[in-house]
Amino acid sequence: MDMNSMRKSYISFLIAFILLSAAAIGDADTVILKSGEMFQTRKAWKEDGIVLFYRNGKVVRVGEDDVERLIQKHITKNDTTSTKAPASKKNASPLKGGVDLPLPGAMGSTPGAVGKTTGGDIGYLDLKWNLSPAEIDGLTAVGTDSAYGGVKQFSKKQRSPRFGRARVEDIVYGFWQGGLYTITVWTGNFLDFRELKAEAIRRFGPAIQNRKDVEKYIWTDRHTDRMLAYDFDTDVGYLWMRSKAVHRKVKGRYPD
């Protein structure tokens, strides 16, 4: 993967996933949309250009063109296509209809998952959620996601971007109705991901890890939901952060 191309083309996304048991979560199929919406489900599959998956006992249908990646733990006999994502992250678009799933602990604090956030609401550069792009120095527009009426994406032109002490590939900021909504920090190899994980734990404290053999970690506090994950198939890692307050406004405007 050309990491310079990836850094330029990645569009930050909103990530959320269904509350599952520790045993089940590692065996779930995963649907990641080009908007960044992520859904973990007991089963996902493709039929005639449509990706289908279960949500709350119902089948959700999404156009295959809107799906960035389909990771299947349960491969159906009708699906012989590759489940890997293309390298490009261009032309991001959301799941139409505003279907969303809560993060574990997103509706309240969970023992062992409450972060020790320092510095603003976010725990990064003293930033606070709902700031405008003009209030954050050095941002450059990189695109607009059509999710929820439009989520504008920005990044900073940095020769060697860092998240605290960790070397990273890119940091992308998402703004909904002019307010900071999400931040996604990207890494392009496992060594950098390990640095990012150490920095996240240093900043946010112990995380929930549902399975010790899966590189996926969750934090939640009064202001912010966070998830850190690594995909060994693509050698891509990320730390995703989302404002709880802004997300409540989003869901008020675009309910399920």
Image (cartoon, helix red, strand yellow):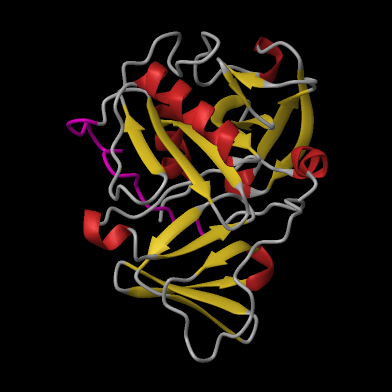
* Residue occupying the point 51% across, 34% down: 239
Say which of 98 and 218 sits in front: 218
Left or right, 139 with respect to 125, comes to right
Q: Is residue 186 above or below residue 45?
A: above
Q: Give the quadrant of residue 54.
A: bottom left
Q: Is residue 65 above or below residue 251?
A: below
The furthest residue to the front: 191
The furthest residue to the left: 111
* Residue occupying the point 57% across, 34% down: 191
- Let me know if residue 21 appears in the view: no
Q: How many numbered marks appear? A: 0
Q: Is residue 13 above or below residue 54?
A: above
* Picture coordinates of residue 133, whole percent (x, y): 68, 19
For the C terminus, give its image quadrant. bottom left
Left or right, 186 with respect to 229, comes to right
In magenta stretch: residue 100: yes
Residues rendered magenta in the picture: 97-112
* Residue occupying the point 40% across, 28% down: 245
Q: Give the quadrant of residue 48.
A: bottom right
Left or right, 251 with respect to 193, comes to left
* Residue occupying the point 31% across, 58% down: 25
* Picture coordinates of residue 132, whole percent (x, y): 63, 18
In magenta stretch: residue 197: no
* Picture coordinates of residue 107, whole percent (x, y): 26, 38
Left or right, 19 with respect to 135, comes to left
- Let me know if residue 132 appears in the view: yes
Say which of 174 and 245 sits in front: 174
* Picture coordinates of residue 44, whole percent (x, y): 45, 74
Say which of 25 and 194 sits in front: 194
Magenta part, dominant SS: loop
